[in-house]
């Protein structure tokens, strides 16, 4: 363990340790972070695909770094947690919809996409009754239930994407323009399964989904990864899918229903689901391939409340190598997410350099298969090494800032939990301010690994430099972000670049360190704000804690 402060300095520090200094940014050395990113994103690591040669190299590298810092294994006596994966390649027939004398035939790719999450070789829908369930939401905290008074057992539901707040832009409905979890397509399929539906289709609309149809058809073709769960996902609806808006219109025409009118109605309080009186049929054949990947875990045990744990997380995986490409075949994933993965090591180093050790444990969790649908983080929260009710907070890092210092700190999912108070204090010490997500309607909060902790009630923080560049202003910051999105994001050109300006990144790491260190030296469990859709899940964890309090 290397300590950077001389004994003389230590003597002057109060019990607040780094909290008193203007910022902890001096704890971080740019050169060290650069080195991690350069190595993890090198061609030798082949783009860090799950279950590849790159995976083993990543594990070896991270474990050696954690060991050198004196960290302990985070999963019993192991630094890894196996994550069983299955890849499913689906071949679907047309989707036929029968109504009276006529029949509608929808083609895979251009008019609809279908798949099954069930890990089986074949599924089908055979003339299942179709029911329009509006937004497909059951949200007691917003007084909303699209399934009230309707039985969809064994039927096929058709639903709209996003939520009534977005549709009406009414700030009093759900969270207005900001997408709630109820607006996310993942939620809608889960709810449809809970309701016993055999089939579940979402109607695509570019604005409400946050992306065009090409993203839907592109991301749902080819092999799809999933976790191998105990029930082989048999609790899911047999068939899930998307319809283009045009296909939905044809379907409603066939049912002699006014699509536009029903869409409006679905956003109104008191909407009632209704049968379309048409029947859907489709058949899907799957090709299954199983493999094992790994989460990497290392911890610093707390000195007083070792069971209580603060989690720092980042996905180590990226898209690997595409041998069908001409030229550069390796998706190095330097920004996404060698930066976050390397940062785990540097935050661990900052903790180990403190003269006052954390009372609570700190877990450094590098998860796999984020790019395949947040699978490593989901697996961890299903099989956590620390119970969820003892997990104080989860702080996620995904694609850190390489464009220089910024005045603003963008909190994705702003207005969620009391963790923002901790962050706001730390930001003030750097002369920075918190701002909300710039595009809350796109639901970025639900699109990275912290989300699975949120779903289980653990407060999360997903914050990063905003665009307001300290020296060149906001326009420059926006241009940098745009350049990354257009030229590098999920492309082989996401490579390490010696010209990166990591000053802002180090400031962000200092913020996250400050938040976690303060939590680690306290006894509070920060709570979700009451208007958050995760408040209830958080209350369940609080209840479990009050029944079995932690002892020193
Ligand atoms: Zn990422």
Image (cartoon, helix red, strand yellow):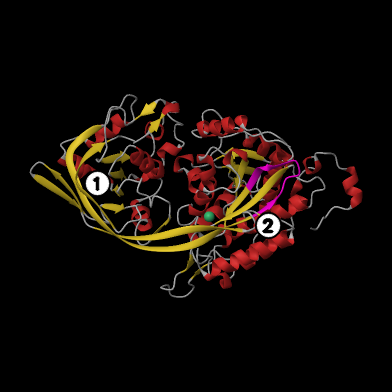
Nearer-N-terminus badge (1/2): 1
Residue 391 % position (x, y)? 61, 41
Q: Is residue 528 visible?
A: no
CB-based contact (under 8 Å), mark 1 and mark 2: no
Residue 497 % position (x, y)? 62, 65
Residue that numbered label 1 is attached to: 246
Q: Residues within 10 Å of mark 1 (few under 14, many from 20)?
A: few
**Residue at x 57% of width, y 30% of height:** 543
Q: Where does the magenta region start and end?
A: 298-311
Is residue 492 shown above or below 517?
Answer: below
Residue that numbered label 2 is attached to: 345
Q: Residues within 10 Å of mark 2 (few under 14, many from 20)?
A: many
Is residue 45 shown above or below 378?
Answer: below
Q: Is residue 178 left or right of residue 4?
A: left
In this view, the residue in front, 405 or 28, is 28
**Residue at x 68% of width, y 43% of height:** 516
Residue 460 % position (x, y)? 58, 41
Q: Is residue 258 left or right of residue 169?
A: left
Magenta segment, principal secondary structure?
A: strand
Looking at the rendered image, the quarter that the C terminus falls into is top right
Residue 299 % position (x, y)? 68, 52
Is residue 85 shown above or below 305?
Answer: below
> Which mark is nearer the camera, 1 or 2?
2
């Amino acid at each position: 363990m290397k300590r950077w402060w001389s004994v003389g300095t230590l003597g002057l520090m109060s019990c607040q340790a780094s909290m008193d200094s203007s910022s902890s940014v001096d704890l971080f050395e740019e050169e060290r972070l650069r080195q991690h990113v350069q190595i993890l994103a090198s061609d030798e690591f082949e783009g860090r695909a799950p279950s590849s040669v790159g995976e083993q190299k990543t594990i070896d590298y991270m474990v050696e770094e954690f060991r050198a810092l004196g960290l302990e294994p985070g999963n019993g006596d192991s630094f890894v947690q196996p994550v069983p994966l299955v890849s499913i390649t689906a071949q679907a027939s047309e989707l036929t919809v029968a109504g009276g004398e006529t029949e509608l035939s929808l083609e895979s790719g251009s008019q609809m996409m279908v798949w099954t999450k069930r890990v089986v070789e074949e599924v089908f829908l055979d003339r299942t009754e179709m029911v329009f369930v509006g937004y497909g939401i059951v949200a007691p905290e917003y007084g909303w239930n699209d399934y009230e008074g309707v039985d969809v057992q064994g039927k096929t539901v058709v639903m709209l994407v996003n939520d009534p707040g977005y549709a009406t832009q009414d700030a009093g409905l759900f969270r207005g323009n900001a997408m709630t979890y109820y607006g996310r397509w993942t939620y809608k399929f889960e709810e449809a399964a809970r309701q016993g539906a055999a089939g579940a289709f979402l109607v695509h609309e570019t604005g409400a989904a946050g992306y065009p149809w090409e993203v839907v058809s592109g991301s749902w073709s080819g092999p799809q990864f999933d976790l191998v769960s105990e029930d082989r996902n048999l609790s899911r609806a047999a068939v899930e899918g998307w319809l283009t808006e045009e296909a939905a219109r044809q379907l409603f025409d066939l049912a002699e229903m006014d699509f536009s009118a029903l869409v409006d109605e679905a956003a109104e309080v008191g909407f009632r689901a209704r049968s379309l009186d048409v029947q859907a049929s489709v058949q899907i054949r799957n090709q299954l391939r199983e493999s094992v990947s790994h989460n990497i875990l290392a911890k610093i045990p707390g000195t007083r409340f070792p069971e209580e744990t603060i989690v720092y997380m980042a996905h180590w995986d990226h898209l690997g190598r595409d041998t069908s490409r001409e030229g550069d075949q390796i998706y190095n994933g330097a920004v996404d997410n060698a930066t976050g993965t390397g940062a785990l090591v540097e935050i661990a180093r900052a903790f180990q350099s403190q003269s006052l050790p954390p009372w609570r444990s700190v877990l450094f969790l590098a998860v796999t298969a984020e790019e395949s649908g947040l699978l490593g983080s989901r697996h961890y929260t299903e099989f956590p090494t620390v119970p969820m009710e003892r997990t104080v907070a989860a702080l996620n890092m995904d694609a850190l800032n390489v464009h220089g210092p910024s005045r603003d700190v963008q909190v994705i999912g702003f207005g969620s939990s009391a963790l923002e108070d901790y962050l706001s204090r730390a930001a003030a010490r750097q002369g920075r301010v918190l701002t909300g997500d710039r595009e809350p309607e796109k639901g970025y909060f639900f699109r990275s690994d912290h989300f699975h902790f949120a779903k289980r009630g653990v407060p999360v923080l997903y914050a990063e430099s905003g665009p307001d560049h300290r020296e060149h202003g906001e326009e420059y910051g926006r241009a940098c972000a745009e350049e990354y999105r257009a030229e590098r994001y999920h492309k082989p050109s996401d490579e390490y670049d010696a010209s990166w300006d990591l000053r802002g990144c180090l400031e962000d790491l200092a913020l996250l360190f400050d938040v976690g260190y303060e939590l680690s030296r306290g006894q509070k469990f920060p709570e979700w704000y009451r208007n958050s859709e995760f408040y209830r899940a958080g209350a369940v964890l609080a209840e479990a804690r009050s029944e079995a309090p932690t002892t020193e």
